[in-house]
Image (spheres, rainbow, N blue to C red):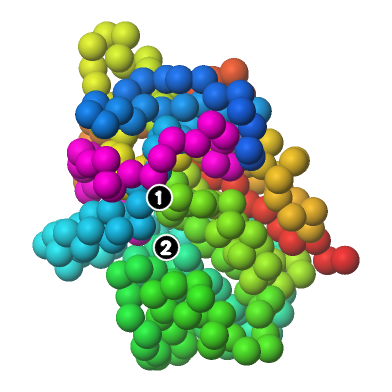
Amino acid sequence: MKAGFYHSTKHLTEEQLHAASAECVICGSRELKRLSDLQKNPSVFLLRCETCSCISASRLPTQAALNAYYATYYDHEVFETAEEAVTFHDIESFAKRISKVVEPYLNGRTLNILDFGGGSGALSKRFCKLHANKGKKTELDLVDYSLARRSYDLQGIAVSEYATIEDLLKNLNNEKSKYDLVLASAVLEHLPNPTEALRQLSRLLRKGGVLYIRTPTVYPIMHTLSKVNVSVDFTFPAHIHDMGEEFWRYYFTELAPHSMRVIVSRPSPVETSFRGSFFRTLAAHVLKFPWRLLGKHYTLVGGWEVFARKSQD
Ligand SMILES: [Zn+2]
């Protein structure tokens, strides 16, 4: 799924919402703190789990409501044009940034990449192109609701597309843990059950392979700006969970499969470029910078990224 700024908030009706749960959908804790409203009649608000630090909508959209939402979303003409501009203005830099971290672990003769929820794969295709000239056999599997089953060759990269993880699993047969790199960039926040997806993605990695995660953490910015009467759209029901530094620390300490170890955890890169959108880009850099000095005490970073590696044993 694509970047947040093309989503917009939609008011959901009673029938489009699951009942509220008294427990955190991520960790099961009952220590939930009410934050700001997302909509009224029926009321949906943000809840912060005091145990895992995930911030989630108090009522989750039903699958039917999400299907209807994304059906109109994919009709949007933006989706058909300039795919590389959609997520990141500078997708080349983003691919290189990921490559810099994972390159030491891509030591086999083949390169198997899974891009989960990355639309038609602008980021992962660029990543593969960075590595394709190193003489490796490169296979890229894309899983996204917007895709239908097909395979093709892209300048020597064998690309296969699937709509769901289940479709992919049917096709993998006996090599279920084969991926050197699994990308989950700007997708987990859209899923009612992101921890189940994380378990599946971790299983699909080979030993020594790397999982890349990028999620928004916009509530701290929303909260700060609300004090000066500036409202920031959470883009519910596309955006259901806000997952920042504290959440990912808790997840990989307490909830993740034991084989997964964090190698890098830091604010995500700025999505826009100075060339494409000067003031937005400047503001994003200014907001992210203090984290370098203040670390976890500073939360106005807007997005988070984690690289976690599956242990060799
Ligand atoms: Zn929790």
Q: Position of residue 151 (x, y in %)?
A: 40, 89
Q: Is residue 53 above or below residue 240?
A: above
Residue at image x 68%, y 67%?
A: 203
Point out the stretch of residues depicted in magenta: 1-26
Residue where numbered disc 2 is placed: 117
The amino acid type of the residue labelled 2 equals: Gly
Q: Which residue is most to the top?
A: 227
Mark drawn on residue 190 = 1
The secondary structure that dominates the magenta segment is: loop
Indicate yes or no whether the magenta region holds residue 18.
yes
Q: Mark 1: is the Cβ under 8 angstroms from ligand 1?
A: no
First in sequence: mark 2 vs mark 1: 2
Q: Nearer the viewer, residue 95 or 265?
A: 265
**Residue 75 location (% of width, % of height):** 15, 64
Q: Is residue 20 visible?
A: yes
Label 2, secondary structure: give it: loop
* Residue 196 part of the magenta segment: no
Other residues around mark 2 within 10 Å, as few (<14) / some (14–19) / many (≥20): many
Cβ atoms under marks 2 and 1 closer than 8 Å: yes
Q: Secondary structure at mark 1?
A: helix
